[in-house]
Image (cartoon, rainbow, N blue to C red):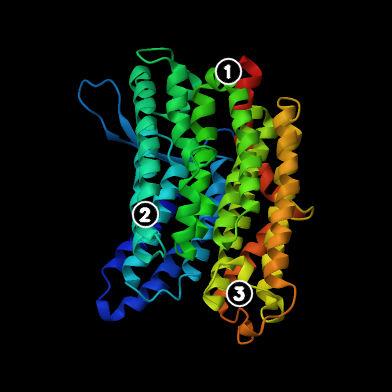
C-alpha cells in the first residue's frame, strides 16, 4: 500500500513528461488523476491504520545495497505508524490542491506537472522511509524539483531564491549525512527501529556533535531562527502551488525528522540540550511574529508567520513529554492545512489584482466575498481561534511545555497575541474599508478547481477544530513510544 502511494506520483510524472508537445495541456489532467489516486490511497492507509497496534504497519522491506565485507546493508524499508500516517494524508491532500491551483499554468506545462509529481514522490519517501540512507536519498531528491519549479516558473528574483534554498538545504544535508554515517556504521545498521532499540555510543565523533549535525539539517528545513532566511525569498518568488507544498509539507520534513530520528535514536543528547531547543523555539516564535508585523508583501507576511508557527513545533518537541510531542505533531498537520489554504488564497488574490502589496488593496470583500470569507477563516485558524484546528494544536503544545519550559511557553502565548495583530491587520487592510474603484472589475472565485481547493482545506480545518480525535488518536499512538523512551530512561 505505501509503495503504491510512493510510486503513483512518479508514474504520473513519467507519463506527463513523455506526452507529445501538441498534447501537453493533458498533463494537468494526468497530474490530477495520479495525485488523486495517491490521495485515495493515503485515505485508505489512514482509515485502515490501527492505532492500537504496536510498531509499523503496511511495511515493505528488502535489502537494496549489501557491500561485501562492509558489515552493514542499506534497505528499501517503508511503512507507517501513528506519526507518519497523518503526514501521508496531509501530503496526499495538498498535492491534489497544488495540482488544482496550477490549472492556469501555460508555460512548459508537461515539465511543470512532472516536477510537481516528482516532488510529491520525494516527500512521500521521507515520510515513509525507515532506513537512514533511504531517508537521506529522498531528502535530497526533493531538492531537484523544488529548484526547477522556483527557478523556471517563479517570479521576481526566482533564480536567486531557488539557489538560496538549494545552498541552505545542501549545507544542512551534508551535516546530516555525516551524522547518519557515524551512527549507522558504528551500529552496523541504518534501520531506524533497530537504532532506537540500541542507542549508539560515543565513537570517533562525540554523540553530542552527531546530534547537532543531524539537528542542523532539520532546523534549516523547519525552519527556525537563525537558519530561516531562505524561506521568505523562496515563498515570495515561487509559484502558488509550490508555496502550498513548501509551507504545507516540506517544512514538516524538519519536524518529522526530529521526531522520527533525532529524539528516539539520541535521547540522552536531546534531553541534555532541551533547554537550548526551548530557547530557540521561544525566540523564533517572537522573532517571526514581530518581523511578520512589518511586512507589506502578502506572501512574505505568511512566510514569516510560518517561522513563528514552526517555533511552536520546536517548543512542543523540547518538552520531551507525550502531551508536548503530540502537540508538535498535531501542529505540523494543522499548520500544513492552514498555511496551504492561506497561500491558495494569496494566489487567487494575486491572479486578480496582480499585486501582493497590502497597502495598495482595500475593500476587496465588496468584489470577492467568497475569497474574503475563506481568507478570514484561514487567518482565524492561523491565530488560534477556538473551534478551528490551530487552537487545538497550540493549546496542546502549551499544556505540554509549560511545566518544562515556562518562560518559552509564555513567549509562545505572547506570540498568539502578535499573530492576532498581524492577521487581523492584514484582513482589515485588504478586504475591509472603502471599496477602491480600481478594483471594480474584480471577479470572485468562479472555477470549479478553485472551489474544490478552498473547500477541501476549509472542511479539514473546521473538522479537526471541532473533532480533534479524528487525527489525535493516530498521532498519540505514534508519539507514545518516543515519550516512553524519555519517561523510562531519563
Please tell me how crowded label 3 is: few (under 14), some (14-19), or many (20+) other residues with Cα within 10 Å.
some
Residue 106 lies, with reference to residue 209, above or below; the image says: below
Cα separation, mark 2 vs mark 3, equals: 33 Å
- Whether residue 185 appears in this view of the structure is yes
Q: Position of residue 37 (x, y in %)?
A: 47, 63
- Please tell me which residue lies in front, 322 or 435: 435
Cα separation, mark 3 vs mark 1, equals: 48 Å
Please tell me how crowded label 2 is: few (under 14), some (14-19), or many (20+) other residues with Cα within 10 Å.
some
Q: Which residue is mark 1?
A: 272
Tell me which label, 3 or 1, sits earlier in the chain: 1
Q: Secondary structure at mark 2?
A: helix
419 lies left or right of 354? right
At 39% from the left and 60% from the top, the residue drawn is: 157
Q: Quadrant of residue 204?
A: top left
Q: Quadrant of residue 448?
A: bottom right
Q: Position of residue 474 (x, y in %)?
A: 64, 43
Q: Which residue is mark 3?
A: 451
| Residues at circles 2 and 3 in contact by the CB criterion of under 8 Å | no
Q: Which residue is mark 2?
A: 160
| Residues at circles 3 and 1 in contact by the CB criterion of under 8 Å | no
Tell me which label, 2 or 1, sits earlier in the chain: 2
Residue 364 lies, with reference to residue 318, above or below; the image says: below
Cα separation, mark 2 vs mark 1, equals: 38 Å
- Please tell me which residue lies in front, 395 or 413: 413
46 lies left or right of 20? right
Q: Secondary structure at mark 1?
A: helix
- Please tell me which residue lies in front, 348 or 207: 348
Q: Secondary structure at mark 3?
A: helix
Amino acid at each position: 500500500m505505501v509503495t503504491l502511494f510512493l510510486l503513483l506520483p512518479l508514474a504520473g510524472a513519467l507519463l506527463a513528461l513523455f506526452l507529445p508537445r501538441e498534447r501537453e495541456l493533458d498533463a494537468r489532467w494526468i497530474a490530477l488523476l495520479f495525485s488523486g489516486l495517491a490521495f485515495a490511497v493515503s485515505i485508505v492507509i489512514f482509515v485502515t491504520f490501527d492505532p492500537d497496534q504496536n510498531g509499523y504497519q503496511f511495511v515493505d522491506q528488502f535489502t537494496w545495497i549489501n557491500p561485501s565485507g562492509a558489515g552493514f546493508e542499506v534497505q528499501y524499508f517503508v511503512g507507517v505508524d501513528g506519526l507518519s500516517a497523518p503526514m501521508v494524508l496531509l501530503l496526499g491532500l495538498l498535492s491534489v490542491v497544488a495540482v488544482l491551483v496550477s490549472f492556469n499554468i501555460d508555460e512548459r506545462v508537461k515539465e511543470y506537472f512532472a516536477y510537481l509529481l516528482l516532488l510529491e514522490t520525494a516527500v512521500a519517501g521521507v515520510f515513509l522511509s525507515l532506513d537512514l540512507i533511504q531517508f537521506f536519498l529522498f531528502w535530497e531528491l526533493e531538492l531537484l524539483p523544488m529548484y526547477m519549479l522556483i527557478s523556471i516558473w517563479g517570479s521576481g528574483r526566482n533564480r536567486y531564491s531557488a539557489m538560496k534554498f538549494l545552498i541552505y538545504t545542501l549545507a544542512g544535508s551534508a551535516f546530516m549525512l555525516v551524522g547518519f554515517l557515524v551512527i549507522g556504521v558504528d551500529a552496523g545498521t541504518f534501520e531506524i527501529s533497530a537504532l532506537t532499540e540500541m542507542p549508539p555510543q560515543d565513537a570517533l565523533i562525540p554523540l553530542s556533535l552527531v546530534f547537532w549535525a543531524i539537528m542542523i539539517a532539520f532546523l534549516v528545513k523547519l525552519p527556525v531562527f537563525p537558519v530561516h532566511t531562505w524561506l521568505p525569498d523562496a515563498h515570495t518568488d515561487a509559484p502558488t502551488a509550490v508555496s502550498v507544498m513548501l509551507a504545507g509539507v516540506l517544512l514538516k520534513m524538519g519536524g518529522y525528522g526530529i521526531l522520527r530520528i533525532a529524539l528516539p535514536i539520541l535521547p540522552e543528547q536531546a534531553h541534555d540540550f532541551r533547554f537550548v531547543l526551548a530557547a530557540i523555539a521561544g525566540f523564533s516564535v517572537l522573532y517571526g511574529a514581530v518581523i511578520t508585523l512589518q511586512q507589506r508583501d502578502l506572501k512574505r507576511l505568511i512566510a514569516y508567520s510560518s517561522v513563528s508557527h514552526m517555533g511552536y513545533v520546536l517548543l512542543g518537541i523540547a518538552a520531551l513529554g507525550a502531551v508536548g510531542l503530540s502537540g508538535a505533531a498535531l501542529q505540523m498537520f494543522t499548520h500544513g492545512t492552514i498555511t496551504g489554504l492561506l497561500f491558495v488564497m494569496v494566489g487567487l488574490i494575486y491572479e486578480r489584482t496582480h499585486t501582493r502589496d497590502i497597502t495598495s488593496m482595500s475593500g476587496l470583500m465588496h468584489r470577492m466575498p467568497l475569497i474574503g470569507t475563506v481568507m478570514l477563516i484561514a487567518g482565524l485558524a492561523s491565530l488560534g481561534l477556538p473551534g478551528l484546528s490551530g487552537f487545538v494544536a497550540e493549546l496542546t503544545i502549551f499544556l505540554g511545555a509549560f511545566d518544562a519550559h515556562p518562560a518559552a511557553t509564555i513567549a509562545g502565548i505572547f506570540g498568539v497575541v502578535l499573530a492576532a495583530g498581524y492577521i487581523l491587520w492584514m484582513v482589515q487592510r485588504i478586504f475591509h474599508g472603502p471599496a477602491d474603484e480600481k478594483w471594480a472589475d474584480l471577479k470572485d472565485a468562479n472555477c470549479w478547481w478553485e472551489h474544490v481547493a478552498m473547500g477541501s482545506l476549509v472542511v479539514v480545518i473546521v473538522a479537526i477544530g471541532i473533532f480533534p480525535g479524528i487525527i489525535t488518536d493516530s498521532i498519540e499512538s505514534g508519539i507514545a513510544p518516543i515519550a516512553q523512551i524519555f519517561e523510562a530512561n531519563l
